[in-house]
Image (cartoon, helix red, strand yellow):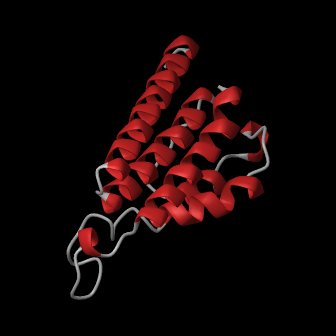
């Protein structure tokens, strides 16, 4: 892939991440807290994948922790430690926010709170603020 295409790809991933954050805020305001959590996780994943693409790398997987940890040292221009807590929070919101069998005898719509959804949105916004200037 040409460098121009890699940069274009990174921008597209970042723009979709921002759209996912806006959708998470709409879900939060509409009371779909589990969905806001999942959308935040998805946005975080896309932000980190945008970074990978911008660095001419090929990301794989859905874990933000893994995506952070596996950025090659010679391609990383930020301290991942500052993002790890947010990545860990968001990783926990990938599966159980969507599936009725992710939580014993419960459904996601009944167990996620407004505070959790807001925390997820805040976490992904912190990741965005750190990564976007590097693209």
Q: Nearer the viewer, residue 29 or 10?
A: 29
Q: In which quarter of the image is residue 16?
A: top left
Q: Residue 133, image x and y in percent?
A: 70, 27
Q: Which residue is drawn at 66% across and 37% down?
A: 129
- For this view, does 65 lie left or right of residue 100? right
Q: Residue 122, image x and y in percent?
A: 57, 51
Q: Which of 51 and 34 is in front in this view?
A: 34
Q: Residue at x 33, y 62 (%)?
A: 34
Q: Nearer the viewer, residue 63 or 33?
A: 33
Q: In which quarter of the image is residue 69?
A: bottom right
Q: Nearer the viewer, residue 24 or 74?
A: 24
Q: Residue furthest top?
A: 4
Q: Which residue is drawn at 65% across and 25% down?
A: 135
Q: In this view, does 110 lie above or below 27?
A: below
Q: How many tags in the picture? A: 0
Q: In which quarter of the image is residue 23?
A: top left
Q: Is residue 47 above or below residue 116?
A: above
- For this view, does 118 lie left or right of residue 123? left
Q: In this view, does 106 lie above or below 48?
A: below
Q: Residue 49, image x and y in percent?
A: 52, 39
Q: Residue at x 50, y 50 (%)?
A: 121
């Amino acid at each position: 892939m040409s460098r121009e295409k890699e940069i274009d790809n990174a921008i597209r991933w970042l723009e979709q991440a921002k759209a996912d954050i806006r959708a998470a805020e709409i879900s939060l305001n509409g009371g779909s807290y589990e969905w806001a959590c999942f959308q935040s996780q998805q946005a975080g994943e896309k932000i980190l994948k945008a970074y990978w693409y911008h660095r001419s790398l090929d990301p794989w997987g859905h874990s933000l922790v893994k995506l952070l940890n596996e950025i090659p040292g010679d391609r990383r221009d930020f301290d991942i430690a500052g993002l790890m807590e947010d990545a860990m929070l968001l990783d926990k919101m990938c599966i159980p926010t969507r599936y009725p069998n992710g939580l014993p005898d419960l459904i996601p719509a009944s167990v996620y709170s407004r505070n959790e959804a807001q925390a997820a949105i805040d976490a992904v916004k912190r990741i965005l603020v750190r990564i976007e200037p590097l693209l």
